[in-house]
Image (spheres, rainbow, N blue to C red):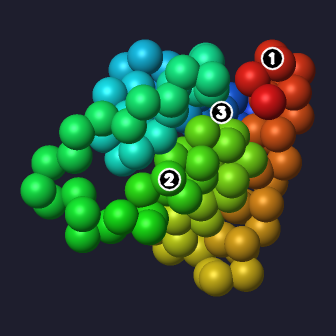
Amino acid sequence: MSPWAVLWSLLAAFGLAYIVGHSKISLSFRLLLGGRPADDPTQYSPPARPEILPLIPVAGPWLVDLLECPACFGFWEGFIGSFVLGQAFEAAVLAGCAVAGSNFILGRATRLI
């Protein structure tokens, strides 16, 4: 894989982590899971939950924290993406670590985390 392809892949992974964890596009989904707006953590008011969501009452806030953390989400993004493309388990773990590290660096550089 060329260095440019790696760079574009890491930037695309960061973009996906931003859309899922910090954009207004996914805000209603994160609130539905029991989270809080990432922009203003002081204004927490849990939304009314539909009947299906009590199946994951403990996982809701934990899952929201995972989605809002660019490094945490990046690891799973890189791991699952690499594993789906047919890489070995060790290569998928390394890809997850690389995406998590680049998401952390880009998140700090853009002041998202």
- The CA span between labels 2 and 1 is 25 Å
Residues under numbered marks 2 and 1 in contact, where contact means CB atoms less than 8 Å apart: no
Q: Residues within 10 Å of mark 1 (few under 14, many from 20)?
A: few
Q: Along the polypeptide, which appears first: circle 3 or circle 1?
A: 3
What kind of residue is marked 1? Thr
Q: Provide the secondary structure element on which disc 3 rests.
A: helix
The residue that appears at 59% across and 74% down in the rendered structure is 87
**Label 1: which secondary element:** loop
Looking at the image, tell me whether mark 2 or mark 1 is earlier in sequence order: 2
Residue carrying label 2:
61
Secondary structure at numbered mark 2:
helix
Amino acid on which disc 2 is placed:
Pro
Which residue occupies 84% across, 48% down? 101
- Could you give the CA–CA distance between mark 3 and mark 2, rounded to whole angstroms? 22 Å
Q: Which residue is mark 3?
A: 14
* Residue 8 makes an appearance in the image: no
Q: Position of residue 85 (x, y in %)?
A: 49, 65
Q: Judge left or right: residue 61 versus residue 103.
A: left
User: For the point 88% across and 34% down, which residue is it?
Assistant: 105
Taking the image as shown, residue 12 lies to the left or right of residue 110, namely left
